[in-house]
Image: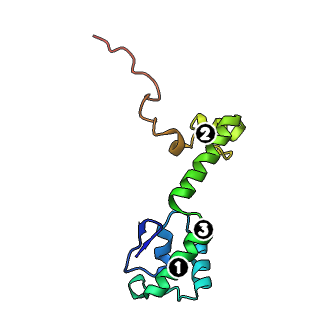
Amino acid sequence: MRLAGVTIPKEKHIEIALTYVYGIGQMTAKNILVVSKIDPTKRVKDLTEAEEDLIRNIVEKQHTTEGDLRRQIQANIKRLKDIKCFRGVRHMRHLPSRGQRTKTNSRTVRGNKRNLAPSGKKPSAQKT
């Protein structure tokens, strides 16, 4: 089954398989299944064509997913950078934008630069 340009795995429960689409988490997947009245423990391979179409229609009409959502997020970040607000400046400098400390952590955003400069004492000159 393909949904929003993503191939959904056949062996998984439909509730879990829906989360493979960018923009659909566990709660959204549960809500989609409640609206479509499909058993969450049903496997993807056991869905009928009508059920697949129903899920596809709900996702396309009511939820922003995949490329559209990625574009929307990038546009929001670009807007923050353009107006040079605090969060935008943090994005520009590749620093955490939600108040985390930067003295020790934040390696994910800043990149792994721990191995560039050795720490501690420099070795003293050896006697000859």
- Vertical placement of 60 versus 94: above or below? below
Real-space Cα separation, disc 3 to disc 2, in angstroms: 27 Å
> Which structural element holds mark 2?
helix
Where does the image place residue 49, in percent across and percent down from the top left?
A: 43, 85
Real-space Cα separation, disc 1 to disc 3, in angstroms: 11 Å
Q: Which mark is residue 63?
A: 3
- The amino acid beneath tag 3 is His
In the rendered image, is residue 98 in sight? yes
- Quadrant showing the N terminus: bottom left
Quarter-wise, where is residue 81 in the image? top right
The colour scheme used here is rainbow
Residue at 46% across, 68% down: 20
Quarter-wise, where is residue 127 in the image? top left
On screen, residue 37 versus residue 1, left or right, reads right
On screen, residue 1 versus residue 53, left or right, reads left
Circles 1, 2 touching at the beta carbon (< 8 Å)? no
- The amino acid beneath tag 2 is His
Real-space Cα separation, disc 1 to disc 2, in angstroms: 36 Å
Residue at 61% across, 39% down: 91
Q: Which mark is residue 91?
A: 2
Residue holding disc 1: 55
Q: Front-most of 50 and 85?
A: 50
> Which structural element holds mark 3?
loop
Q: Front-most of 41 and 111?
A: 41
Q: Which circle's residue, 1 or 3, is located before the other in the chain?
A: 1
